Image (tube, rainbow, N blue to C red):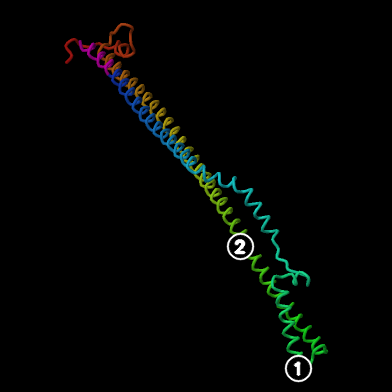
Amino acid sequence: MVAAAVAGAAVAGVAGSAISSSISGNAAQSAANTQAQAAQNAQQLQWQQFQQLQQNLQPYMQLGPQNIPGLQSQLGRLQGMQFSFNPTMQQLEQTPGYQFTLNQGLNTVNNQLAAKGLNLSGAQARGIANYTTGLASNTYQQQYQNALQNFMTNYGVQSDTYNRLSGLVGLGENAAAGVGNAGLQTATNAGNLITQGANAQAAGTIGAANALSSGITGATSSLGSNALLYSLMNPTNAGGNIYGNAYSGFDVPSNYG
């Protein structure tokens, strides 16, 4: 009766150890799977967010390629703009109002000299020459200022166009750089999450293996202990176990105890 109880206890101990190790192993693997799934979900969320960011910035990124040709063309136009002013006397004489001013001035000089009795004199010739020279100089300066002002106005318009195009290209460049940085960060985060998931799976596998190993060790130890107890209590057990044989050479008094 006692031997049967010991045998039953041994079986129960082994079964309990096996069940306990199985539960521990399953729990470790389940926890690892949960952590790995969470890492995978986080990785997918990171990727979805990056795709949404890329989609949102796509119209701005297109501004760069679309406006680069125009920007290059405008730059060439600006570089080709050089101020130059070198008119001939004939060109100055064709200036609006020049002939009228010249005729009016010559009439004034002639009238003034004629009133002094200097008509057709050397003084009259010098007076006419001085007036025409002064008029030409003033006309040149005036036309120079007009030409320079027109050039600066045109250059300003062309520069403004260039700056507008440059702003659009810069906007596209910044958008592309933002997407590139986001992509790099997403790749880094995804790599970390993949590593975390792999580590979790590995830790779960190791934990399950350790639980199984611990269960086997416990079961073996329990089985050995119960076998020893069973042998001590049954020294004449069939099969002649080592514990029974160890006591076979001794006489045990029937009235012992």
Secondary structure type for disc 1: loop
Q: Position of residue 187 (x, y in %)?
A: 50, 39
Disc 2 vs disc 1: which is toward the camera? 1
Left/right of residue 184 with respect to residue 149 in the rendered view: left
Residue 11 x/y as whole percent: 28, 15
The answer to whether residue 153 is above or below residue 5 is below
Q: Could you say which is closer to the camera, residue 65 or residue 180?
A: 65
Amino acid type for the residue under numbered disc 2: Gly
Residue type at mark 1 is Lys
Residue 11 covered by magenta stretch: yes
Secondary structure beneath label 2:
helix
Q: Which residue is mark 2?
A: 156
Specify the label residue 179 is tagged with. Answer: none
Magenta run includes residue 185 = no
Q: Quadrant of residue 214?
A: top left
Q: Does 119 appear above or below 156?
A: below
Residue 116: mark in rendering: 1
Residue 3, how many percent across, how many down?
23, 12
Q: Nearer the viewer, residue 222 or 57?
A: 57
Q: Residues within 10 Å of mark 2 (few under 14, many from 20)?
A: few
The magenta region covers 1-12
